[in-house]
Image (cartoon, rainbow, N blue to C red):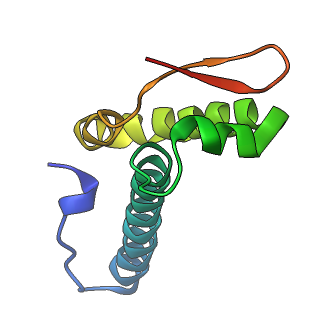
Amino acid sequence: MSILDKEVDYQNYAVVVASDILNVYKQLYNNMIEQYRHGTLLYWRNSKATPQEIADAFGTDAGEIFQDHYALGQLLTTINPEEVAQINEFVGNFTINEDGTVTITE
C-alpha cells in the first residue's frame, strides 16, 4: 500500500497535521503527474503542430526543455513507475543536438 492510498485517523493534533501534510503531498503529486501528462500529450499528440515544428519553435532551448521533462519523469517514476510508463508510451524518438536544438527521428 502506498502512502497515497493511506487513510487517516483523526484522533489527535499530530494526526491532523500529518493528514494535512499528506493532503499537500497528494495534491502536489497529482498536479505534477497531470502536468507531466499534459505536456507530453501537448507535444507528441498535438493536432495543430508536429513535434519537429514545436521543437523548432523552442530553438536552442529545446534541449533544456527535453532534459527537464526527462528529469521530472525520473522523479515521478520513483513514486509511481507504472503511471509514468503509460505516459511515456506517447514519447517519440528524438536527438538533442550539441547546439541545444532537438531533432525528431522516426
Residue at figure coordinates x 44%, y 42% from the top left: 44
Measured from the top left, where is residue 79 in percent x and y? 36, 42
The correct choice, above or below, for 65 with respect to 42 in the image is above
In which quadrant of the rendered view does residue 89 lie? top left
Of 74 and 79, which appears nearest the observer? Answer: 74
Q: Relative to 67, does residue 35 appear above or below in the rendering?
A: below
Number of numbered discs present?
0
96 displayed left or right of 16: right
Most foreground residue, 96 or 36: 96
78 displayed left or right of 59: left
Q: Which residue is drawn at 44% across and 66% down?
A: 31
Q: Where is residue 80 in the image (x, y as percent from the top left)?
A: 30, 42
Query: How far across and how far down the image is residue 24, in percent?
Result: 46, 73
Q: Nearer the viewer, residue 81 or 16?
A: 81
- Residue at horizontal 39%, vertical 86%? 13
In the rendered structure, the answer to whether residue 103 lies left or right of residue 88 reads right
Q: Quadrant of the image for the C terminus?
A: top left
